[in-house]
């Protein structure tokens, strides 16, 4: 399959849901051309690692989990007056190591002040997100961990529809962590419990339960 073929938006739109396409020996210029061609297409994640291009298509279930997790963190931010910046599945890329990826969600917490009011971020100069989220309902993101490490993302939350796990960057690799370094109030067990309610309760009901939990914590 030629690079010209994958740059065709019609081809991208015809990819089946929950599929993964990997191409090798793709230039950085072609990667950036693909990003420009598809724009901020919903249900699509594109990663690039020194010549290897990965295109993933996502299901509504996948997107539902990532949006719920964003809304939970947003409630925490509002309730506790914590400055958290949300950049969704923004493309995090750097020309130096020629690497780029799109998390399912990402947040700035410790680095929020450094970003300030910016809405256009250049990751060659600006810090990477403090937290990246990967939803592994039909895909496995573990292979992307070295990519995140090279980009300097300090924390990854990974949810496989059964359990959420947290991973903290130490040196050039990630180690398991019971709780978030950026948001210590949140631990893997608590977020797993609320995400597990999806399919049983509406998102509104889950958010209300989460707010009640926040109110019950001594501060």
Image (cartoon, grey):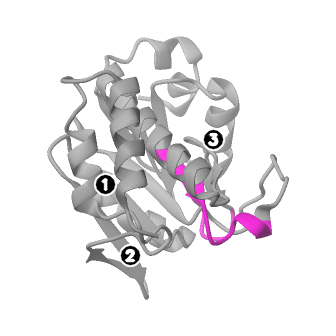
- Real-space Cα distance between discs 3 and 2? 32 Å
Which residue position is annotated with label 2? Answer: 168
The residue singled out by tag 3 in the image is 30
Farthest right residue in view: 117
Seen in the picture, residue 29 relative to 169 is either above or below; the reply is: above
Say which of 1 and 149 sits in front: 149
Residue occupying image coordinates x 21% and y 59%: 189
- Residue 158's label in the rendered image is 1
Task: Report if the CB atoms under discs 1 and 3 are less than 8 Å apart.
Answer: no
Instruction: Provide the residue span drawn in magenta.
Output: 95-114
Is residue 132 placed above or below 104 in the rendered structure?
A: below
Mark 3, secondary structure of its residue: helix
Residue, x 81% and y 48% (percent of image)?
Answer: 120
* Residue 130 visible to an observer of this rendering: yes
Magenta highlight on residue 84? no
Tag in front: 1 or 3: 1
Quadrant including the N terminus: top left
What residue occupies the far bottom of the structure in this picture? 171
């Amino acid at each position: 399959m030629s690079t010209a073929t994958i740059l065709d938006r019609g081809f991208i739109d015809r990819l089946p849901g929950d599929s993964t396409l990997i191409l090798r020996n793709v230039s950085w210029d072609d990667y950036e051309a693909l990003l420009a061609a598809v724009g901020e297409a919903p249900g699509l994640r594109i990663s690039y690692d020194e010549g290897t291009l990965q295109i993933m298509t996502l299901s509504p279930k996948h997107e539902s989990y990532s949006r719920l997790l964003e809304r939970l963190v947003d409630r925490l931010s509002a309730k506790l007056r914590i400055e958290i910046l949300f950049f969704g599945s923004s493309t995090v890329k750097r020309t130096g190591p020629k690497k780029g990826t799109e998390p399912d969600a990402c947040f700035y917490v410790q680095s929020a002040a450094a970003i300030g009011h910016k809405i256009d971020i250049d990751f060659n100069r600006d810090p990477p997100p403090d937290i990246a989220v990967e939803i592994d309902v039909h895909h496995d993101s573990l292979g992307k961990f070295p990519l995140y490490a090279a980009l300097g993302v300090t924390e990854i939350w990974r949810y496989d529809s059964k359990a959420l796990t947290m991973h903290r960057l130490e040196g050039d690799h990630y180690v398991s962590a019971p709780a978030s370094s950026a948001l210590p109030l949140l631990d893997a067990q608590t977020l797993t419990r609320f995400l597990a309610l999806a399919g049983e309760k509406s998102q509104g009901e889950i958010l209300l339960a989460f707010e009640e939990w926040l109110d019950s914590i001594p501060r």
